[in-house]
Image (spheres, rainbow, N blue to C red):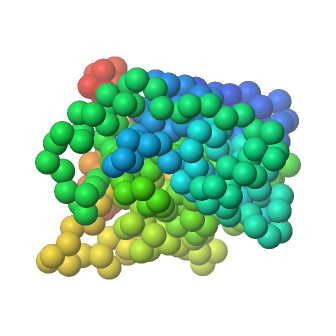
Amino acid sequence: MKYSMIGTWKMAFNGVIIGENILKNGGNVKDAIENAITYIEDNPNFNSVGYGSLPNIEGELELDAAFMDGNDLSFGAICSVKNIKNPIKVAHLLSNSKRNCYLSSRGAEKFARLNKFEFKNMLNDIAIDRWNNEIQKNFDPDNLEAYDGHDTVCMVALDSNKNMGVGVSTSGLFMKQSGRVGDSPVIGSGFYCDSKIGGAAATGVGEDIMKGCLSISIINNMKMGQDVQSACENALKDHVNRLKNPNYSPGTMSVIALDKNGNFGVATNRDEFPFIVTCENFSTKILVCRNNNLSMEIFEPDEEWLNNYDYD
Ligand code: ASP
């Protein structure tokens, strides 16, 4: 495959089209990922990424993002940042650093300011209303689930020069504690990429994803010879089985991956998980991964499915 790109959730659709246009014209994987995610961060219609996304318990927006270059394994990540317009751009720039490439809150904001990244008030009225409604409910802060509206946008891509990369951006779990960081900006858990093997990323309950370092598990399965779909399914199945415990039921987790040839894989422990793909053989389209007892079925959704799907 000359080029290929995969993104999490239906909200990735227009972002992947942007990436597709870059990749099919011979563009670089890094541009494809940054532009795709920037579009989603800027779009107030998506509830859980960038502008107008999901506040923490104190009604503040604390965003996480990461970027990884599969050629030399360099990565950049930021967590718990406030009012940075495009966290993915900051994470991308940080991936050029050999040290200090993972910065949190104040330090990350200072870095962004020094490098002239745009700042804006990322809370909008919709996000404030969503928080106002939620704070009045009797919810259990120790039992948060991934937002059903949906959550982290993850993009994995391969360009025509065989470069691979991964980017992720999220506001994290809705009503999380201030300072809480999930899997998304954590290398090996929320994302991983090695152009000699493939790239992977995760979305869902970060605490449970981190317990299994799911993204690197997928890469390791591929390294051991598993095809990309089996690598995703086995990593998720092994991890869910490991977490099984009469006193604990694991949160929802979904993963996407590409191998070094651009073939894709996906797995979820939700009932269904929509994702977006493109490659030289077909233009951007939505597919759905259906979980049958941790064995995956992938199908193209029909009109009815799409009409019934209310989420991002
Ligand atoms: N993984 C994200 C987190 O735990 C949330 C999500 O993707 O649903 O912060």
Q: Is residue 255 above or below residue 130?
A: below
Task: Work out whether residue 217 or residue 279 is closer to the camera in this orientation and state it.
Answer: 217
The residue drawn where x is 32% and y is 56% is: 252
Task: Work out whether residue 141 or residue 73 is closer to the camera in this orientation and state it.
Answer: 141
Return the x and y of residue 86 as percentages of the image width and height. 65, 38
Question: Total number of numbered labels?
Answer: 0
Can residue 108 be seen by looking at this rendering?
Answer: yes
Task: Work out whether residue 296 or residue 63 is closer to the camera in this orientation and state it.
Answer: 63
Dividing the picture into quarters, in which one does residue 277 lie? top right
Q: Is residue 132 left or right of residue 263?
A: left
Q: Is residue 122 left or right of residue 34?
A: left
Return the x and y of residue 1 as percentages of the image width and height. 72, 46
Q: Is residue 150 above or below residue 257?
A: above
Can residue 281 be seen by looking at this rendering?
Answer: no
The residue drawn where x is 38% and y is 75% is: 238
Return the x and y of residue 74 as percentages of the image width and height. 77, 64
The residue drawn where x is 47% and y is 59% is: 179
Return the x and y of residue 288 as percentages of the image width and height. 39, 40
Q: Quadrant of the C terminus?
A: top left
The residue drawn where x is 61% and y is 60% is: 104
Q: Is residue 76 above or below residue 287?
A: below
